[in-house]
Image (spheres, rainbow, N blue to C red):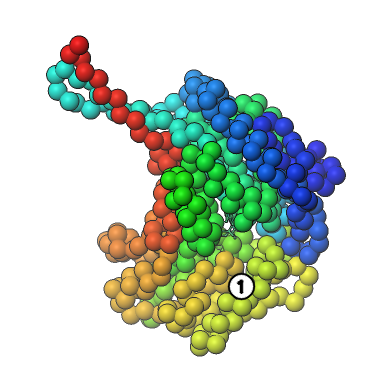
Amino acid sequence: MNALLQDGLARNYVAGSWREGDGGGVIAVEDPGLEEHMADSAQAGEESLAQALEAARTSFDRGDLADMNPAARGRLMGRIAQEIRALADEGAYLLCRESGKSLSAAHDEFSEAAEYFEYYGGVADKIEGKSIPLGPGYTDYTVFEPYGVSAQIVPWNFPVSIAARSLAPSMAAGNSTVIKAPELDPIALAMLGQALERAEVPAGSVSILNGIGGDLGARLVASSEVDQIVFTGSVFTGQAILHAAADTVTPALMELGGKSAAVVFEDANLDAVISSLQSGIFYNAGQVCSAMARVLVHRSIYEDAVARAAEMANGLSVAHGLENPEHTPVVSALQLSRVEDLTSTAQQDGARVAAGGARIDRKGYFMAPTILADVNPASRVAQEEIFGPVTCFTPFDTEAEAIAMANGTDFGLVAGIFTRDLARSHRVARKLRAGQVFVNEWFAGGISTPFGGVGKSGFGREKGLEALYNYVRTKNIAISLKV
Ligand code: NAD
């Protein structure tokens, strides 16, 4: 067991050292597959927050990262990636237990986290400005500068990889970063702190704090010491943070929820649809912002698609995450009751339960893999994010109807198209209201492809080169040569 946890307590990583909590207690962390307490995190209080912010500012002003040779900054990030890989076995075990996800999914998170540091480390020396022709007598150019102190709020569904997704471009750009860990599963994220420490990241340039969102998180984003806010989480919290950002006029990046639809045309390869659906809605028990939460199917193949989806869902292996099953519990009792409650409204609204529909009668917070058919697109279950292993099938007759239905929610994170018709895939992709469109494979793309939402799914982009420009601002330097 990791040194941070020898006594079952994950501490706060502040200004390069591990601190006890000063926030009045600990937050209990539960293993959702066993419904058992597994560890605690030490709550950071007012003093730890102030120290983390002061250390971040001091590190930034000293130029620890910003003035480091950019190639050296990239190499430092490469060392972080190595340390993440070295800690991955231990970290994945802890992540599996605290989040409920499968051990292999927990391993995927550590690999992905390492890849973010490699990817953005590789571009740290390629953040290039441009020269603007003003005619004789002038030289004009732009440079990209880091914001300063970036406050980053991380959700519980992918605590390690989402933290890395924002921290890596933030570091590559030269910012200092203060991270607020999710209260439900903060333990593996402390391992990321350990990787930073082992890689000898300048003290204070990154801190990781444990605490309750509405308390520590709210104080972090409201601080006048923060120059940029990066939030990944629910729409409700995003709105609260935007209000706080308005008060201090602080730029904010919002990666929020989704209710993403796949449009399955009559010429689709149904094998590809069903295998995409398995990962699209059952990976991480459906607790994925870009989950395949709605499946709109051409009426001519609709019943076949529903039957095959139900057969797949009913056949998934179910066990504690450590056994690497295909289906795992949701993160908490509260999450399970939310998922079950929303699912039950579908039945009241006339939907047909083709598979699942309720919690599984066994230890752990397991919701049965659920396929709802004949879902009314205007009903609550088709409009609200469920964030669990539940998807909604609805038939359509025409391409225009499918597009209108896919675009018919407040969200717009990702969307999918299943067809063998190349022209149709391009045509429909342009019409779908989403930040990313998958064709014939849900979750196609990777860390190099820009990701983010429209509408209530948020704004700004993570991943890819595009994301780097969320972590810098442009300065123009206009020089008269006439003196
Ligand atoms: P959440 O909004 O409840 O919490 C997210 C984080 O915000 C947590 O760390 C929490 O402690 C913190 N927080 C809560 N209240 C706060 C406040 N007032 N001020 C500052 N911080 C506060 O979301 P969640 O339940 O952890 O995550 C699930 C949600 O996140 C889903 O809606 C999901 O779609 C979304 N999500 C989006 C993306 C994306 O990239 N678009 C990725 C993952 C998750």
Q: Which residue is drawn at 36% across and 79% down?
A: 396
Q: Nearer the viewer, residue 460 or 358?
A: 460
Q: Which residue is drawn at 17% across and 25% down?
A: 134
* Quarter of the rendering occupied by the N terminus: top right
Q: Going by the picture, which residue comes out furthest to the top?
A: 483
Whether residue 370 appears in this view of the structure is yes
Q: For this view, does 297 lie left or right of residue 356?
A: left
Whether residue 271 appears in this view of the structure is no
State which image quarter holds ligand 1.
bottom right
Q: For this view, does 90 lie left or right of residue 448?
A: right
User: Can you give x and y, in whole percent of width and height, for residue 143 in the image?
Assistant: 35, 28
415 w.r.t. 398: above or below: above
Q: Which residue is drawn at 17% across and 13% down?
A: 482
Q: For this view, does 479 lie left or right of residue 159?
A: left
204 w.r.t. 451: above or below: above
Amino acid of disc 1: Val
Q: Which quadrant would residue 4 be assigned to in this image? A: top right
User: Can you give x and y, in whole percent of width and height, for residue 49 in the image?
Assistant: 65, 41
Which SS class for mark 1?
Answer: helix
User: Can you give x and y, in whole percent of width and height, for residue 40 in the image?
Assistant: 78, 51
Q: Going by the picture, which residue comes out furthest to the right?
A: 7
Q: Going by the picture, which residue comes out furthest to the left?
A: 136
* Quarter of the rendering occupied by the C terminus: top left
User: Can you give x and y, in whole percent of width and height, for residue 85 in the image?
Assistant: 65, 37
Q: For this view, does 468 lie left or right of residue 161?
A: left
Q: Mark 1 points at which residue?
A: 339
